[in-house]
Image (cartoon, rainbow, N blue to C red):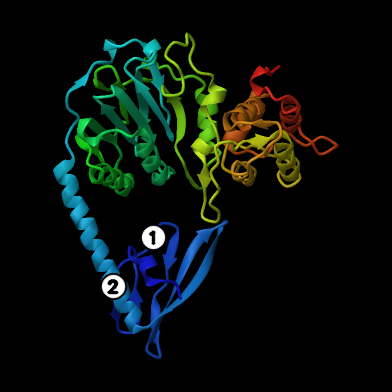
Amino acid sequence: MSNPFEFNRIGRVREIGKTIVLRKYPNVQWEKTTLDNGEIKYERKVYSEDRYKTFTFNMDNKEIEEFNNAHEKQIMIDSDREQKLKTIRKPLQNTHKTNDFKKELTRGVLQGEFGVTDGNDAIPILGTFGAGPCLIVAIYESEKKSAFLTHIDASTCLDSFNRELSRLNYNPRTSQVHLYGGDSSSHDMCMDVYEIMENKGFVIVNSDIVREETDSASFAIDARNGNVYSNVNSNDLDTPNIDARLTCRGLGAGGVTGLSKIYDSRIYSSSRESSPKEDEEYTATEASSFDDNDSLLESSDITISSNELNKIINSYKSKHPLNIFNIRPSSEIAALRELVGVPRKDTSFTREEIAKCIESARSCKSQERAQIIRGEDSFQKPTSNGTDEVLMRIQKMLSTPKIESQHSP
């Protein structure tokens, strides 16, 4: 049978006559169970693919004891965390007004992204906004005059966050950490991040997490002096190419995804007059995806070749002719996400370039795009040869390696 420890958050197994009662989970139905020859048999129904799938398990008395012990242990852990949260959660302190800085000195960080900058860089301020259940983590290292900011969402793999912290090589003793955002739905994630920072020895200056307020959190940090700002408006930050970047994040829908680098002063020289090219800022490695079935290998040169992308398009157009690159998560998007994990030597495209391609295709006809968003199935009836206009445009754009040079008609 499955390890009973997998179910330690379900609820204590209680014998009531000849039945056992288990709490219900979202999208999961737990059936009452009966005693049979000294063993306890119970069923779990999980909602998947528009129907309930039933799983049956047997637990003998020893396994029930292990199950209950694990459950009691988890209750103690949760209780300790709840008490700890009451101690550490405090309103933000020592924040400044956003009119203290100019927009051209900023770079906006969206969900699932992170940025690194320093006080001597042309862009010394990093900021983010719109964090409801998401958590904002900002760090200022006073010796290096360096700042790090990330916007962690529900699909962020915390291993990738931990990895980026190690790469920063910040001295915890000379660093100030600010944690802001999250709500009851992201309680565990917020506490996980707090404990990561605490275990590394960082000084946590602000810890306004698992908030009860209904407004979304926003935050900015200045690498020149460590000043922090709340109530940051999207108009206060230079956040180019928002649609493409959010689409990039969407390619990882349905699984756990690594953080994507949006700005790094360690790579982009402060003497550059213009901001870094967006097609240089995204690589599949920096946004590597994971799901329940596969762990994609990491590589410094992971990209997607035009040939491979065309194969995916051709493969899925026959299965999904009416909603290719639908704005909702779907199997064709999942296929693109999986393909990101395959290194290619021939002409290739970055994750963002593909996002631009998809975004351009989506906007080829505004009326049809609106139908996608509404979930209607009338979008782009296939032509006689089985290739709709969206696919034709994408394939045409893929004929040259410079996607960004292509313009929508």
Precedes in sequence: disc 2 or disc 1: 1
Nearer to me, 64 or 350: 350
Name the element at disc 2.
helix
Is residue 254 among what the camera can see?
A: no
Residue 120 placed where, x, y %? 34, 14
Name the element at disc 1.
loop
- Residue 77: numbered disc: none
155 shown above or below 370: below
Residue type at tag 1: Tyr
Residue 340 placed where, x, y %? 60, 41
- Name the side, left or right, on which 389 lies relative to 217: right
Is residue 240 among what the camera can see?
A: yes
Nearer to me, 15 or 93: 93
Q: Quadrant of the C terminus?
A: top right
Q: Tell me where residue 318 sits by quadrant.
A: top right
Q: Nearer the viewer, mark 2 or mark 1?
A: 2
Judging by the rendered image, the residue that carries numbered circle 2 is 68
73 shown above or below 173: below
Residue type at tag 2: Asn
Residue at the farthest left position: 87
Nearer to me, 20 or 280: 280
Residue at figure coordinates x 52%, y 51% from the top left: 291
Nearer to me, 271 or 255: 271
Judging by the rendered image, the residue that carries numbered circle 1 is 25
Q: How many marks?
A: 2
Residue at figure coordinates x 26%, y 34% from the top left: 171
Q: Tell me where residue 201 sits by quadrant.
A: top left
Residue at the farthest right position: 384
Residue at figure coordinates x 43%, y 29% from the top left: 110
Q: Residues within 10 Å of mark 2 (few under 14, many from 20)?
A: many
Residue at figure coordinates x 24%, y 22% from the top left: 226
Q: Residues within 10 Å of mark 1 (few under 14, many from 20)?
A: few
